[in-house]
Amino acid sequence: MEQNILLNYNKLWKLMIDKKMNKTQLHEKAKISTNAVAKMSRNEKVSLETLAKICYALDCEIGDIIEIVIEERRK
């Protein structure tokens, strides 16, 4: 069986709504690139450093902003 690892940032978007923050404000407060924000919008991989900056800016843990889903696939 193959594993497909998917990333999901829905927890981040929900947290931002709770904090009344938009993506531009996240980019500015966390000092991350607009490209990183765009990648997360598409559930793509970003660096651990980027995730750490977001956690620091939002005062949260990494599990509060990202979910990792592993799908099992048959070959």
Image (tube, rainbow, N blue to C red):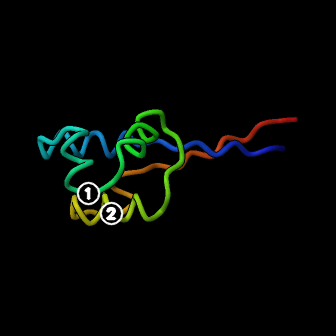
Nearer the observer, 15 or 49: 49
Check the image and report above or below for 4 versus 59: above
- Disc tally is 2
**Mark 1 sits on what residue?**
30
**Mark 2 sits on what residue?**
53
Which circle marks residue 12 in the picture? none
Query: Percent from the top left, x then y, of residue 44?
Result: 52, 41
Disc 1, SS: helix
Residue drawn at x 16%, y 42% is 21
Query: Percent from the top left, x then y, of residue 26?
Result: 23, 48
Nearer the observer, 65 or 51: 51
Q: Relative to 22, is 39 on the left or the right?
A: right
Nearer the observer, 1 or 59: 59
Residue drawn at x 88%, y 35% is 75
Query: Percent from the top left, x then y, of residue 22?
Result: 19, 38
The disc labelled 1 sits on which kind of residue?
Ala
Displayed quadrant of residue 37: top left
Displayed quadrant of residue 53: bottom left
Counting residues from the start of the chain, the first of labels 1 and 2 encountered is 1
Residue drawn at x 29%, y 40% is 13
Q: Are marks 1 and 2 in contact (CB under 8 Å)?
A: yes
Check the image and report above or below for 17 versus 65: above
